[in-house]
Amino acid sequence: MARLADRHPGNIDGRWYVDTRCIDCDVARHHAPTLISALADGQSVVARQPTTPGEELEMWRAAVACPTKSIGTTDRAQPPADVFPWELTAGVFLLGHNDRRSFGAHAWYVPRDGGGFMVDAPHWSAELVAAMEARGGVTGVLLTHRDDIADAERYAAHFGARVWIHADDREVVPFATDEITGTEPFELRDGVVVFPVPGHTRGSVLYVVDDEHLFSGDSLAWSWRRNDLVAWEDVAWYSWSEQLRSLRRFAQSERRFSWVLPGHGKWHGASSDEMHQRLTALLDRLEMSQAS
């Protein structure tokens, strides 16, 4: 719960506020970019109070997703039911409840006949568990890399789910039941293709679902500020040059996507042709910058 005593003085007057425990993870600004902004030091503050039911819902999503629980109301209101999971696009749910241990990374749920799967994991939430149980449960937890694990072990134990991680990141996920190896893509399960992309970490992978949804971990994302795809050299913990080579190999493959659904960064949907063109153009720019 947000701490009124720690309300940041940079908040605009009104019912909603952000306290000073903000860690500049950008999650709240992903959910409510016209309502929440960042100060020069990265601290989020409420820049404009919501005025419509839609904007109020945006604030609730920001509040429930916030990994430090720094967003709240002066009257200590409780969130409405079913803020999360949020069906962002048909058949794909954003789970919210982002975890500080993952520096606020997003996690995702895809229901399937016979049991759905999570991509990465959020903070433990009984409400999320009930919602996923109502949609057929979880048979697999697909981890994109070692950083965004949060309560994956607890979710997997509850659902009796298999846990997938690349062997090169396995050391921090001892509870994993299955290993991805090498750099060659393969079909993991119905319509789910694994595409290893060493770079952000040595064991980073992409999951491409139905040639439509790209779960990109921390290897690729959408920037709402730039209105374009982005990748970040400053968090290429393993190798930036390897990350560029990995993403180029992915761009040159037969795999296509119309939604990018990252761990960090914003989500976005467009036509598969546009997304492919944007990815190719991004890599052209980044490779040129690296060569100069």
Image: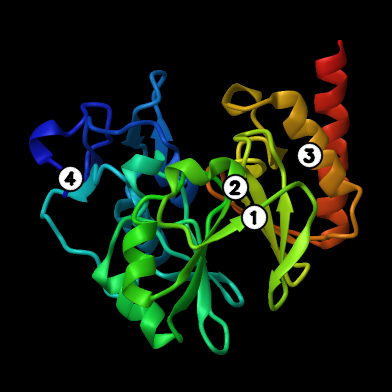
Q: Nearer the viewer, residue 135 or 65?
A: 135
- Kind of element beneath mark 4: loop
Q: Residues within 10 Å of mark 3 (few under 14, many from 20)?
A: many
Q: Are marks 2 and 3 in contact (CB under 8 Å)?
A: no
Q: Determine the secondary structure under disc 1.
A: strand
- Residue at the spot of label 3: 246
Of all residues shown, which one is farthest toward the top? 292
The residue under the point 74% across, 53% down is 195
Viewer-side label of 3, 1: 1
User: Which mark is drawn over residue 180?
Assistant: 1
**Quadrant of res 8:** top left
Q: Are marks 1 and 2 in contact (CB under 8 Å)?
A: yes
For marks 4 and 3 on the same chain, the one whose residue lies earlier in the sequence: 4
x and y percentages locating residue 249 in the rendered image? 86, 43
Q: Residues within 10 Å of mark 1 (few under 14, many from 20)?
A: many
Nearer the N terminus, badge 4 or badge 2? 4
Indicate which disc, 4 or 1, sits on the residue closer to the N terminus. Answer: 4
Callout 4 crowding tier (Cα within 10 Å): few <14, some 14–19, many ≥20: many
Q: Amino acid at mark 3?
A: Ser
**CA separation, marks 4 and 2?**
39 Å
Label disc, if present, on residue 2 of the rendered structure: 4
Gap in Å between the C-alphas at discs 4 and 3? 41 Å
What element does badge 2 sit on?
helix
Quadrant for the C terminus in the image: top right
Residue 58 position within the rendered picture, expressed as x and y whole percent measured from the top left = 40, 58
Marker disc for residue 167:
2
Ranked by sequence position, the earlier of labels 1 and 2 is: 2
Residue type at the position of mark 2? Ala
Looking at the image, residue 24 lies above or below residue 54: above
